[in-house]
Image (tube, rainbow, N blue to C red):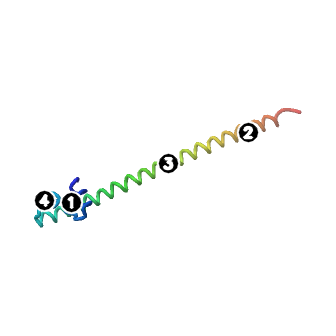
Amino acid sequence: MLFAIIGGLTGNGDLINVTGVDVPVVNSLANIINSLYFIFGGIIGVSIILLILRWRESYMIRKRMEEIEEGLLLINEKLDCVLKKKKKPK
């Protein structure tokens, strides 16, 4: 994996050329391995980003629900006060 990163950074894309071996069949296999590392690394990276975004969204929804619940409790308390005042005989 380290060789794939070095090969990708150097721009030649050959995993084995980094080690000094110059065999066409081995280099084509190295290109395939580099491609697989790139593809799976991209899939894993995107998955992690999507998980973070999903967690953030659920966190924001939970926070909003707590705010709504606090508001409803406040409204309920005020309604109780109003109803208690109306029930008292004058």
- The image's mark for residue 58 is 3
Cα distance between the residues tagged 1 and 2: 67 Å
Cα distance between the residues tagged 3 and 1: 37 Å
Cα distance between the residues tagged 4 and 3: 50 Å
Residue pointed to by mark 2: 78
Identified by mark 2, the residue type is: Lys
Cα distance between the residues tagged 4 and 1: 17 Å
Identified by mark 4, the residue type is: Gly
Foreground: disc 4 or disc 3: 4
Query: Where does residue 83 sit, x and y in percent of width and height?
Result: 78, 37
Residue at 53% x, 48% y is: 60
Cα distance between the residues tagged 2 and 3: 30 Å
- The image's mark for residue 33 is 1
Which of the two labelled residues, at mark 3 and mark 1, occupies the earlier sequence position? 1
Residue at 48% x, 49% y is: 56
Which of the two labelled residues, at mark 4 and mark 2, occupies the earlier sequence position? 4
For label 3, count other residues whose C-alpha is less than 10 Å away and answer few (under 14), some (14-19) or many (20+). Answer: few
For this rendering, which residue is in front, 30 or 55?
Answer: 30
